[in-house]
Amino acid sequence: MKEVTVTAPVNIAVIKYWGKRNVKLNLPTNSSLSVTLSQDHMCSKTTVSVDDSYDTDSLFLNDEQNEIGGRLSNVLAAFRSLTEDASLKDAKVKITSTNNFPTAAGLASSASGFAALVFALGKVFVPTYNNSQLSTIARQGSGSACRSLFGGFVAWEKGESEDGTDSSAVEVAPKSHWDDLDALICVVSANKKAVASTAGMQRTVETSPYLMHRAEQVVPQRMADITDAIKNKDFDKFADITMRDSNSFHATCLDTHPPIFYLTDVSRLIIGVVHALNEAAGRAVAAYTFDAGPNAVLYVQRKDKDLVLSIVNDLFGPCEGAQGASHSTLLHEAKID
Ligand code: PMV
């Protein structure tokens, strides 16, 4: 028997990926950029084992057996074709994965989940592969997963090729470069999102005239500008671009037909509070960003963390833990990994 256990972190995009130019290969319409969060608070832990006694592949997600299909089958097929160990070509695998945070609630669980899975399978099937090579396989599981193979600040270059070999993740800066940045996760709802990201992206690609404008005219400059902001540790600029890009992504969701609503009234209240706070301070104290769900991630500089925490707690109630929370609840102060 061969068995490997790994963990992988969550990443939260500040330039959002939304839209596939090739659905089968998970190639994006635009490049994206994210910050990897600390595994102390949020991670996926995955064990992969291979044994002659297994007669079928199996998957246990948060202790429940799940079907293996679609993109997971593609990932397994990719590893089986890449391995140089002939005994592994037809070997069956058992995958066990758990998250220590709400699954599929717009908190990037597919990113950490597929990153952990690909990292573990990589160790078994292609031990010589580096993280960049593995990121092109993780991308085929869940696009954003390719960014979770690196810590710190990570770009996913959309690439130009047809086969996706150049659509991979690269490190923009390590965590140590900008160490006093924190992320506060505000769980507005721990329920599963109403429209899964793949279905949502497909509907947006098919119906939103704004999407290609965003991909071609807006995102390329933002990728360059936020890279500069990170290199110069310019929080004002970082916050401005992060908030604008979150709003631009949710605008494409609204421009989709029928529209997709990921934000709720509580999400919009958080947006208002952050703008009021920044305006009162005359500088960026916090930056919000929302993935495909109502939960806010607030990026703050460490010197402002306690202030922002106390404001969020005062306005939105005490910490109750994520499960079953019906209104905004502060789940974590995640550090940046
Ligand atoms: O990787 P997916 O298919 O779960 O899509 C992620 C989409 C967003 O979280 C909304 C944006 C992003 O870049 O992570």
Image (cartoon, grey):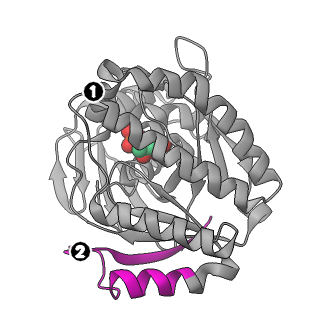
Report if residue 106 is visible in the image.
yes
Q: Is residue 265 found inside the magenta-colored segment of the image?
A: no
Give the residue at x 58% y 41%.
127
Q: Position of residue 46 (x, y in %)?
A: 39, 57
Magenta range is 308-337
The residue type indicated by label 2 comes to Gln
Q: Mark 1 points at which residue?
A: 203
Give the residue at x 34% y 88%.
318
Decide if ligand 1 comes within 8 Å of the CB at mark 2.
Answer: no
Question: How dense is the environment of label 2, judged by Cα within 10 Å: few (below 14), some, or many (20 and up)?
Answer: few
Judged left or right of residue 227, residue 20 is left
Q: Where is residue 194 in the image (x, y as percent from the top left)?
A: 20, 48
Report if residue 43 is visible in the image.
no
Q: Regarding ligand 1, which quadrant of the image does it lie in? A: top left
Where residue 323 is drawn, which disc sits there?
A: 2
Residue closest to the eye, 291 or 123: 291
Answer above or below: position of 244 versus 279. above
Q: Is residue 309 found inside the magenta-colored segment of the image?
A: yes
Query: Which secondary structure, mark 1?
Result: helix
